[in-house]
Amino acid sequence: MNQPVAQKLFFWILIVISIITLSAPTLVVLGASLTSGNIIVFPPDGLSLKWYKALVEKQELQDAFIRSIWVAIICVLISLPAGTLAGIALVKYRLRKGALIQTYLLLPFTIPLIGSGIGLMLVFGEVGILGSLWPVGVATAVINLPFMIWAVSSSATGLDPDLELAAQSCGAGPVQTFFYVTLPSVMPGIITGSLLMFILSLNEFLVSLLLVDARIVTLPVQVYNSIRSIITPDLAAVSVVFIAVAMLAIAILDKIVGLEIFLKSK
């Protein structure tokens, strides 16, 4: 066997191993959610959709899912303007101490989640809003904001400054130039970042666990509270729903801006 063929074979073996490794947890969870038995087993003990029906009948899971959606929406509404303006500013303008500003914006990545969660818990408790739902959305926006900034910055690097100069030469003011030239040019990054922030916020567990009480738990916290007693197949069905939501978001992203924009933003 010559060297190019051996390298190609080795390359494809690595790809197959990677696909199997990444897909195995999802396939196991999917199979467990379809079991007809009363406990999680794989391979499933028969096939049934009864656990998905059970999700529809469990009001506490539905309420928790709706709360998670609201948290994700709040996160996007906060990170959208903040991340967009920061991403554009970091690329377009020569800011004084720009490196220091970029480091500051990346602080959420350098601080462990448990540290960020405890800090936010103390701050929200001091101002008297701890235990409400909307601070969880604020917290997830703060922690995941670098993703939004990176996505917008990736699009802003391809922004042609001549387009803005042409708009200004035609009489457009700074505000008009921003909304009619700059913003549409970075829209792929804005859409990418918004979908990513939505998914990350929807699945946020640790911060939600620290900031909510038993009356307003989000879905990840509800699942955690459930598995502390017994792991039933309906929890596997919840996991499949989360996977389906993420896949839907990725499909929307690919349809609107293309996955290559998302990959470049990473």
Image (cartoon, grey):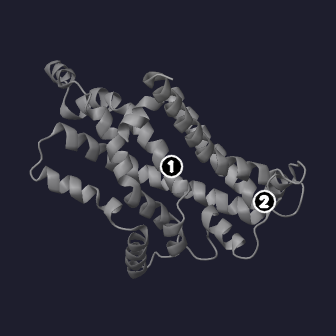
Q: Is residue 170 left or right of residue 206?
A: left
Q: Which residue is found at the position 56% from the left and 35% from the top?
A: 13
Give the residue furthest to the front.
Answer: 1
* The image quarter in which residue 68 lies: bottom right
Q: Amino acid at mark 1?
A: Phe
Q: Kindly identify which residue carries mark 1.
A: 198
Which numbered marker is on residue 23? none
Q: Which of the two discs, 1 and 2, sits closer to the camera?
A: 2
Look at mark 2 in the image and give the residue it sits on. 234
Q: Name the residue located 38 percent from the left edge and 73 percent from the top edge.
A: 115
Q: Nearer the viewer, residue 183 or 99?
A: 99
Q: Residue 135: x and y, percent?
A: 46, 66
- Which amino acid is tagged 2? Asp
- Label 1 element class: helix
- Indicate the position of residue 120 as horizontal and vertical percent values: 40, 72
Alpha carbon separation for disc pair 1 and 2: 24 Å
Mark 2 closeness class: few <14, some 14–19, many ≥20 residues within 10 Å:
many
Taking 151 as reference, is 75 above or below it? below
Q: Position of residue 203 (x, y in %)?
A: 56, 57
Outermost residue toward the left in this view:
96
Tag 2 or tag 1, which sits nearer the N-term? 1
Do we see residue 15 in this rendering?
A: yes
